[in-house]
Image: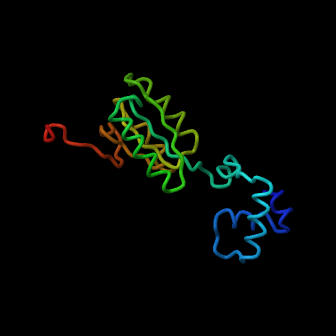
Amino acid sequence: MRDVAQRAGVSTKTVSRVFNDDPHVLPDTRALVEAAMRELNYVPNALATTFRAGRASVIGVAVPDVVDPFFAAIARAVEDTARRHGLSTLVTSLGEDPDDEKPALESLLGRQLTGLVIAPVGTDHSWLERWRGHTPIVFVDRAPVGLTTDTFTENDEAGA
């Protein structure tokens, strides 16, 4: 970003404003910065962006098995929606062993996600309470145990 700013003769904040499509940048200045970006093949540093924002622009998706068509469809729907909002997705399989769920989810949550969508396999989710204050968590397919949060489930009995 500093190289682009130097080439265009502007501040790094102006480069940031151009990159983020701030409407308050003068057209001539925008053209200079965009030309410098093209010349230098500017690619933003995702790690720096995460550091400044305090969280990654990534939605975590945790399902029992990503090759299962039902869970693959959930992951794809989250990915499609995330992409429309400029977010990426990080998908993981939890497996069927409830003991594997907590370490897998903590690994995801430790990445400062924008949010987490989970199709749980565990039998106690109360430990997630400490994460809810800064990471939105949504359960799908099965409701959480020991935690009150947003949940999307279907009524299998009525559906049958």
The image shows residue 155, relative to residue 17, as above or below, that is above
**Which of 21/41 is in front?**
41
On the image, the x and y values in percent for residue 40 come to: 80, 54
Residue 52 as seen in the image, left or right of residue 61: right
How many circles with numbers are drawn on the protein? 0
**Which of 73/50 is in front?**
73
Image quadrant for the C terminus? top left
On the image, the x and y values in percent for residue 19 come to: 68, 62
The image shows residue 135, relative to residue 145, as above or below, that is below
Residue at 76 percent across and 59 percent down: it is 37
The image shows residue 50, relative to residue 103, as above or below, that is below
Residue at 33 percent across and 39 percent down: it is 144
**Which of 148/20 is in front?**
20
Q: How is the image coloured?
A: rainbow
Image quadrant for the N terminus? bottom right
- Name which quarter of the figure residue 112 lies in: top right
On the image, the x and y values in percent for residue 71 come to: 36, 35
Residue 92 as seen in the image, left or right of residue 72: right
**Which of 156/106 is in front?**
156
On the image, the x and y values in percent for residue 36 come to: 79, 61
Residue at 70 percent across and 52 percent down: it is 44
Residue at 54 percent across and 33 percent down: it is 107
- Name which quarter of the figure residue 86 lies in: bottom right
